[in-house]
Image (spheres, grey):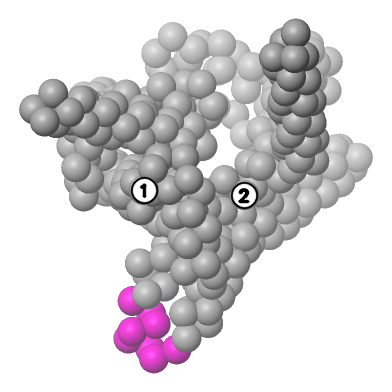
Amino acid sequence: MNFDSSFNKNAIDTFIKIATISILVYWCFSILRPFMMLVVWGGIIAVALYPVALWLHAKCRISKGKASGLLSLIGVLLLLIPLVWLSSGLYTGGTEVYSQLQDGTLQVPRPTQAVKELPVVGEKIYAAMYHASTNLEGAMAKYSEQIKSLATTLAGAVGSFAGGLLQFIVSTIIAGVFMANAENCQKAFNKVANRLTNGKGAELVNLSKSTVRSVVQGVLGVAVIQSIMAAVGMVFVDVPAIGLWALAVLLMAIIQLPPILALIPVIAYVFGTQSTTAAVLFLVWCIIVSGSDAVLKPMLLSRGSDIPMLVLLLGALGGMAMSGIVGLFVGAVVLSLSYQLFVSWLDESEQNKMN
C-alpha cells in the first residue's frame, strides 16, 4: 500500500510538473510567435553574412561589432532604396493618371500590328487596346470587371512586396545584433545542443551553419547565373534597360519564383520589335534560363558541406513546399541534422557491437 501511495504521489507530481512546463513553453511560444519569422530570417542572414563581417574586421581593422553594424546598415539601405523608389513611382504615376482621367486628357496609343501577332492572346490584347485608344470611357465601362480584378491583384502584389521588404529590413537589423554577439550566441546554442545530444552540440551547430551557408550560396549562385544568362540573351535582341531586367530576374530567382515571370514583358517587347525567328529563339532561351535552376541548384547546394547533395536538395525543396522560402533553409538544416544524428546512431551501434 505504501508503495502504491508513493508511486501515485510521484506520478501526480511528475504530471503536474510536466503540465506546468508544457503550459509555460506554449505560452512563451504564443508570445514570441509574431516575431518568430523575423528572428529566423535574422538568424539565416547572420549565419550567411558573418564570414563577410569577419573579413571586414580583419581587413579594415575595426571591431566585430562595428563590422556587423556596417553590414546591417548596408543591407537596410539596399532594401530601403527599392522600397522608396517603388512608393515614389507609384504615387507619381498614380497621381498623373488620375489627373489625366479627371481632365479627360488620358490617351492610350493605338496598338501596332505586331501586338496582334502575339501568340494565343495577341488578338484579344489588340482588340482591347484598339477600343481603349478610340473610346477610353467605353472601354473602361466594358472591361470594368477585368480592370477591377487586375487593379486588386496588382495592389495585393505591391502590398505583399512592400511588406516583404519591410520584414527583411527588420530581419537585417536583427541579423546585425546576432552578428555583433556571435560568440555568445554560439555558446548558447552549443550548451542547448550539448544538453540534447550528449556532447555533440558543437558538431551539430557547425553542421547547421555550413548547411545554411551552402543553401545561401546555392540560391545566390543560381540567381546570379540566371540573371547573367538572361542579360546575354537580351543583348542579342537589343532590349533596352538590360540592367533593370537582369536585376528583376535576379530578384525573382532569389525569392524562388520562376525568372520567366520577370521576362514576360521582355518577351512581348521582342515579339513586337524583332523578327518571328529571333523572337521564338529568345523565347526558347528564356525558357532554358528559367529552367536552368533544376540543373544548377543540385550542383551548388552541396558545396562546402559534408552532407550528401540529395539530402540537402530534398530538405530545401520539401521545406520550401511546406513553409515557403524560409523553409528552403530550415528544411535543409532539419533534414541535415536528422541525417547526421541517424548516421551517428548507426556508427555508435556498430561500435557497441564490436566492443
Q: Work out which residue is located at the far right of the displayed protein and give it.
A: 102
Q: Amino acid at mark 1?
A: Gly
Q: Quadrant of the C terminus?
A: top left
Q: Considering depth in this image, is 17 or 221 the residue closer to the camera?
A: 17
Q: Is residue 350 above or below residue 174?
A: above
Q: Quadrant of the N terminus?
A: top right
Q: What number is the disc on residue 199?
A: 1
Residue at 52%, 58% (x, y): give it. Answer: 188
Membership of 61 in magenta stretch? yes
Q: Is residue 56 above or below residue 319?
A: below
Dividing the picture into quadrants, the one containing residue 108 is: top right
Q: Which region shows up in magenta?
A: 55-62
Marks 2,1: beta carbons within 8 A: no
Membership of 219 in magenta stretch? no
Q: Considering depth in this image, is 177 or 133 the residue closer to the camera?
A: 177
Q: Earlier in the sequence, mark 2 or mark 1?
A: 2
Q: Secondary structure at mark 2?
A: helix
Q: Position of residue 107 (x, y in %)?
A: 72, 36
Q: What number is the disc on residue 39?
A: 2
Q: Position of residue 173 (x, y in %)?
A: 62, 63
Q: Work out which residue is located at the far left of the displayed protein and give it.
A: 354
